[in-house]
């Protein structure tokens, strides 16, 4: 009994899914709504019959009157467009006759110019160099250069050729340098093997 109930439920779910997907497809690709009423009546009749079968009734539900269409569906459809004549086509521009101007060169990408390191942070920069920092740069940052970006890198020990990059972006240069200096110090403390 349980298996029969599960099978009936599965059939109902599949049937509802088919009706929903089919209805959407018919709505998108089928004839206009006025012409679809006869088909819809047949679908409703079949759904009622299946519903009564699922409920255990052997007698089908009373038939729904189906009204025939006044004209065949083919007569209601607009005629298919025929082949267009060459004279009906819009003329195609002939670009091979027009001279082509050379493309304008792209503007050069300008890297922000490095700022001189302020005197107030020269001590921190010396400390960074002592910790092994290289490629030390202070550049303006942001749309109008309102911020300062301080960056450097430190080589990893051994002959690996790899470096660790550090940078900070702050509203003033001394703060950016101080942040990077803190980053390098913490990295050295966390990795004692990096000490030279």
Image: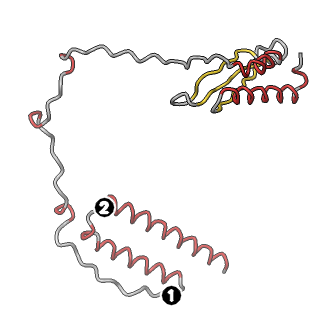
**Where is residue 92 drawn, in percent x and y?**
17, 28
- The one nearer the camera, 195 or 136, is 136
**Residue 72 in the image, given as x and y percentages of width and height:** 19, 66
In the picture, the quarter occupied by the N terminus is: bottom right
Query: Compared with residue 187, is residue 34 higher up or lower down, i.e. above or below?
Result: below
Instruction: Tell me if mark 2 has few (under 14), some (14-19) or many (20+) residues whose alpha carbon lies within 10 angstroms of its own.
Output: few
The answer for how far apart the CA atoms under marks 1 and 2 are is 34 Å
Q: Residue at x 16, y 54 (%)?
A: 79
Residue 20 is left or right of residue 99, and the answer is right
Mark 1 vs 2, N-terminal side: 2
Q: List x then y, in percent, for residue 24.
A: 39, 63
Q: Residue at x 58, y 74 (%)?
A: 9
SS at mark 2 in the image = loop
For residue 68, above or below residue 141? below
Q: Residue 118's quadrant in the figure?
A: top right
Mark number, residue 30: 2
Report helix, strand or loop for mark 1.
loop
The nearer-to-camera label among 1 and 2 is 2
Q: Residue at x 83, y 18 (%)?
A: 131
Which residue sits furthest front?
120
Question: Cβ–Cβ below 8 Å for labels 1 and 2?
Answer: no
Q: Nearer the viewer, residue 34 or 165?
A: 165
Residue 34 vertical placement versus 49 (above, below) = above
Compare residues 106 and 66 and report the one nearer the observer: 106
Residue 47 marker: none
Q: Quadrant of residue 128?
A: top right
Q: Position of residue 181 (x, y in %)?
A: 77, 26
Q: Is residue 128 left or right of residue 137?
A: right
Question: In the image, what residue occupies the spot 50% across and 82% down?
Answer: 53
The furthest residue to the left: 87
Check residue 57 in the rendering and tell me which mark sits there, or answer none.
Answer: 1
């Amino acid at each position: 009994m349980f298996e029969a109930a599960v099978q009936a439920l599965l059939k109902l779910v599949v049937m509802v899914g088919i009706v929903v997907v089919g209805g959407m497809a018919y709505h998108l690709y089928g004839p206009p709504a006025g012409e679809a009423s006869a088909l819809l009546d047949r679908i409703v009749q079949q759904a009622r019959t299946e519903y009564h079968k699922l409920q255990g009734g052997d007698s089908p539900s009373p038939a729904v009157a189906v009204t025939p269409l006044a004209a065949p569906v083919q007569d209601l459809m607009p005629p298919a467009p025929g082949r267009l004549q060459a004279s009906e086509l819009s003329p195609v521009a002939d670009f091979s006759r027009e001279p082509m101007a050379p493309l304008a060169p792209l503007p050069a990408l300008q890297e922000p110019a490095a700022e001189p390191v302020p005197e107030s942070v020269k001590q921190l920069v010396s400390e960074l160099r002592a910790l092994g920092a290289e490629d030390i740069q202070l550049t303006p940052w942001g749309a109008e250069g309102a911020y300062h970006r301080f960056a450097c890198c430190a080589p990893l020990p051994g002959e690996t050729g790899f470096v660790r990059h550090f940078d900070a972006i702050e509203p003033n240069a001394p703060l950016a340098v101080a942040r990077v200096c803190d980053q390098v110090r913490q990295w050295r403390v966390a990795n004692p093997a990096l000490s030279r």
